[in-house]
Amino acid sequence: MEILLHTCCGPCLAGSYPLLEAGVGAGKTALFWENPNIHPFIEYQQRLVSFKAAAEHLKLEVVYGDTAYGLDRFLQALANDYGPARCATCYRLRLEATAKAAAKAGIAAFTTTLLISPYQNHELLIKTGQEIAAQSGVAFHYTDFRPGFSSSHAAARELELYRQKYCGCIFSEHDRYKNDKKYLNPVGKSGV
């Protein structure tokens, strides 16, 4: 294997992998799963099951990092900074784990399916990947997977993969639903 592809979920894998394969060639990619940011517990389990189904469908080798539900680890890494900077911490956690796993397996480069989402901070992902590459000695391989975003939805339907409604962390879930009229607090902002 030449590239270790950090994978956040099955749909993003289904949309990213064809673009990566077209650029580097078939049989040169292994997948990596470590996502301590995904919450709550049921969401984590659904995404892991979806990832495994997509990996099996694509017949790709999987390297697992820490597969334990990572609420404590994620919150500790955030160090009480739950604002926009949390994304930088989240990217770093996952990409450092990917680079470390790549080095251990003798894989020359790493990348991430996070690069498929138009909702992610693309420039920050690239910068973080490059910084980790410089620190780890494992190359960061950049491919703009965003052209595969719409096909990831079609692949998810075809493969019957769970499709999440938010990025992954509990804070992104809040951001996703806080202004949705279906979910507004029926007793007002002050609570009960």
Image: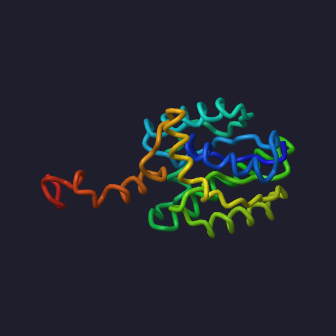
The vertical placement of 78 against 156, above or below, is: below
Which of these two is toward me, 95 or 121?
Answer: 121
Q: Residue at x 68, y 40 (%)?
A: 65
The vertical placement of 14 against 53, above or below, is: below
**Residue 59 lies in what quarter of the image?**
top right
Which of these two is toward me, 18 or 30?
Answer: 18
Q: Residue at x 74, y 34 (%)?
A: 61
Which of these two is toward me, 126 or 128?
Answer: 126
The vertical placement of 149 against 9, above or below, is: below
Report whether 144 appears left or right of 184. right
Q: Position of residue 72 (x, y in %)?
A: 51, 46
Coloration mode: rainbow
**Residue 128 lies in what quarter of the image?**
bottom right
The N terminus is located in which quarter? top right
Q: Position of residue 188 (x, y in %)?
A: 15, 59
Q: Position of residue 111 (x, y in %)?
A: 72, 54
